[in-house]
Amino acid sequence: MSTTTQPAKPGFLQRIDRERLTLAIAAPLLAIVIAALLCSVLLIVAGYDPFQAFNIMGKFAVASDGQVAILNKATTYYLAGVAVAFGFRMNLFNIGADGQYQLAALFAAYIGGQLNLPSFIEIPLLLIVAMLVGGAWAGVAGVLKVTRGVNEVISTIMLNAITTAIIGMLLVPGIFVPSTGGGTSNTVQTKLMSTSSNFFTITTQGGSLYGFIIVAVLVGVLFQLVLTRTRFGFDLRATGRSESAAAASGVNVKRMVLTSMCVSGALAGLIGMPDLLTNSHYFGQNFQSGIGFTGISIALLGRNSPLGIGFAALLWAFLDATAPNLSVLNFPPEIISVMQGVIVICVVVAYELVRRFGLKRQQQRVGAQLAAAAASVKKEVAA
C-alpha cells in the first residue's frame, strides 16, 4: 500500500519576506537615529546638553500624565494623517485638510449650541455634520479637477484661504455668535454646546484620556478594510498608480477622483472633533489650527498605511507633548520643530535608499537564479 505525502504548507512566519520586512523597519529607524544625531549636534553648537534634553523627553514619555497627553494628541494627529493619506493613495494631494476641519468644526459647534438632544443622538449627528461639511468643501476641489482640470494642490490651498474668510464672515455677533458674545471669555466664539454633546473620557492615573481614541482606531480599521477588501479600494489604488490603465479596465476615473476627494474631506472633518467635543465645546478665534498640515507630515512618515500612520502620530505627539518640558529648563522650543522637520526629510531619504538597496538585492537574486538555470541547462546539454 503506497502513501503519498502532501507538501507541508508554509507557516505564517515562512510566508513573510523577512528581508523586505527588515528593510521596511530599517527606514524609519534610520531616519529617527539620523534626526537625533543632527539635533544633538545643533544642541551642542547652541551650548546645550543633548543627553539632558533626551532624558527629559524620555522621563515625560514614561510618566502616566505624559502618556495620556501623548495619546490625546496622537488621536487628533492620527485622524489628520488618515484624511491626507486617503487622498495620497489616490495620488491626490489634499492640502486643504486644515480648512476643511476648521469649517466643519465651526458648523458642528454652531449646531451643537442650538440643540439639546440625548447624547446618543446628538453626538453622532454632530459627527455626521462635520463629515458632510468637510466632504462638501473638499468636493469643490474635486469638481474643479474633473471638470476644469484644476490641480488639487492649487485649489485646496486657495480653499484654505477662502475658509479663513468664510469663518471671519460667519463668526460675528448675530450670525454664528450670540449677540452677547457667547461663551465665557472675551473672545468671539459660538454659543457653548449643550452637555449632551460632551464625548466621554476614560479616567486614568495620568488624567482624562479621550474616548475619541476609539473612533480613531475604528477609522483606521475601516480605512484598511476599504483599501484591501473592497472593489472601491482596488479601483482607488489602481487609479492612483495609473489613471490610463484604470480607465482601460473600466474604472470611471473622474468619479473616483471626485469620490476620493469627498471621502478625504469627510475624514478631515473629524480632525477638530476630539477637542471640540471633549475640551472647548465651542468654536472661537483660538480654536486649534494647523493640524491639517501636520497630517501631511504624518501621512508621509507613515507611508500612507493605517499602522504606519499610527506610529507616526505617536512620534509626532511625543515630540509636541515634550516641548513644554524642555522650555521650562530653558531649552529652545524650536529644537522640536527642527527635529520634526529633520525626521520628515530623513524618512524620505531613508526610504529612497532602502528602496534602491532592495531593488539592487532583487536584481542580484534574479541574476543568481538565471545563472543557476543557465548552468543547469549547460550541464544537461553536456550530458
Image (cartoon, helix red, strand yellow):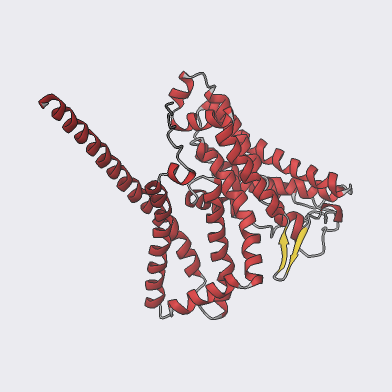
Q: Quadrant of the C terminus?
A: top left
Q: Is residue 336 left or right of residue 73?
A: left
From the viewer's perspective, tell me whether residue 152 is left or right of residue 280: left
Residue at 71% x, 62% y: name it. 209
The location of residue 299, given as percent across then percent down, is: 52, 48
Q: Is residue 166 above or below residue 210?
A: above
Residue depicted at x 50% and y 50% = 302
Q: Answer left or right for 347 relative to 166.
A: left
In the figure, 341 relative to 222: above or below? below
Q: Residue at x 62, y 43 (%)?
A: 221
Q: How many marks?
A: 0
The answer to whether residue 320 shows anywhere in this view is yes
12 vs 188, nearest the viewer:
12
Percent coordinates x, y for residue 114 in the rendering:
86, 48
Quarter-of-image position of residue 67: bottom right
Which residue shows up at 84% across the image and 51% down it?
A: 113
Image quadrant occupied by the N terminus = top left
- As drawn, the residue found furthest toward the front would be 1
Q: Position of residue 106 (x, y in %)?
A: 73, 49
Going by the picture, which residue comes out furthest to the left?
Answer: 382
> Is residue 268 visible to us here?
no
In this view, the residue in front, 132 or 13, is 13
